[in-house]
Amino acid sequence: MTMSNGDLKTCNGSIEKTPFRIFVGYDPREDLAYQVCRHSITKRSSIPVEIIPIVQSDLREKGLYWRERGQLESTEFSFTRFLTPHLSDYQGWAMFVDCDFLYLADIKELVDLIDDKYAIMCVQHDYTPKETTKMDGAVQTVYPRKNWSSMVLYNCGHPKNKTLNPETVNTQTGAFLHRFQWLEDEEIGSVPFVWNFLEGHNRVVQNDPTTQPKAVHFTRGGPWFDAWKNCDFADLWLTEMEVYCKENNKEAHVAN
């Protein structure tokens, strides 16, 4: 029985569709962002998906995460994201994504870009933020390959990704992890920027459909924070939130 890109091949040779695993970073103060991100994926997906929140408290209870939180960690998933291959039993492909994304296209289009020759694939941004703070006042940091790790397709069975075990994730530096220093450059595949379209940085070019976002990343802070309620694409996120809340009979609570 083998699996590649969401297909499960059984012993008799038949092909069964298995859900594509998507791990979403979860932070209690951004629960609504997580719910809307999840909704935006499932609503548009034409393939089976399994969406799994990466919850730090759960990982601590299971003995998979014991790292103390650093002053520059703006979310609870700053480092837990790198457990994605381990949580996938180092098999098949899986995706990690921050919770502050809004998907506007079918995730199948992204899965179709997967190339087994790479250990990971991501949008390779050249991004230097202008702001000194983000979200609800968290410190904005600047470092090479910033935002590359915010949405990553992991080839979990790639030998190099076995480096990402709990010991490594709990002890290695932020530079080692967020800059993918366990990999050679040629082992990192590129994904079009529209799959990690940075609000406030990337731009839509008129009459150029290749610049239309397929996933908006509210990396500075999204409209669930009062300070960012008027950011670009806020209307799209708020519409998605309203649909989610209506379907689930929930009231929205915006963070201060």
Image (spheres, rainbow, N blue to C red):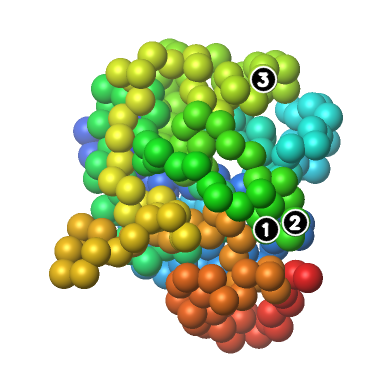
Q: Which residue is mark 1?
A: 135
Name which residue type carries label 2: Gly
Residue at image coords 35%, 25%: 188
Q: CA distance from mark 2 to mark 3?
A: 24 Å
Q: Residues within 10 Å of mark 1 (few under 14, many from 20)?
A: many
Residue at image coords 45%, 42%: 127
Name which residue type carries label 3: Thr
Q: CA distance from mark 3 to mark 1?
A: 23 Å
CB under 8 Å between discs 3 and 1: no
The percent coordinates of residue 60 (x first, y second) are 80, 34
CB under 8 Å between discs 2 and 1: yes
- 159 or 200: nearer the eye? 200
Q: Which residue is mark 3?
A: 173
From the viewer's perspective, tell me whether residue 140 is left or right of residue 65: left
Q: Is residue 99 visible?
A: no
Q: Is residue 215 visible?
A: yes
User: Callout 2: helix, strand or loop?
Assistant: loop
User: Callout 3: helix, strand or loop?
Assistant: loop
Q: Residue furthest left?
A: 207
From the viewer's perspective, tell me whether residue 127 is left or right of residue 219: left
Q: Which residue is mark 2?
A: 137
The percent coordinates of residue 164 (x first, y second) are 57, 20
Q: CA distance from mark 2 to mark 1?
A: 6 Å
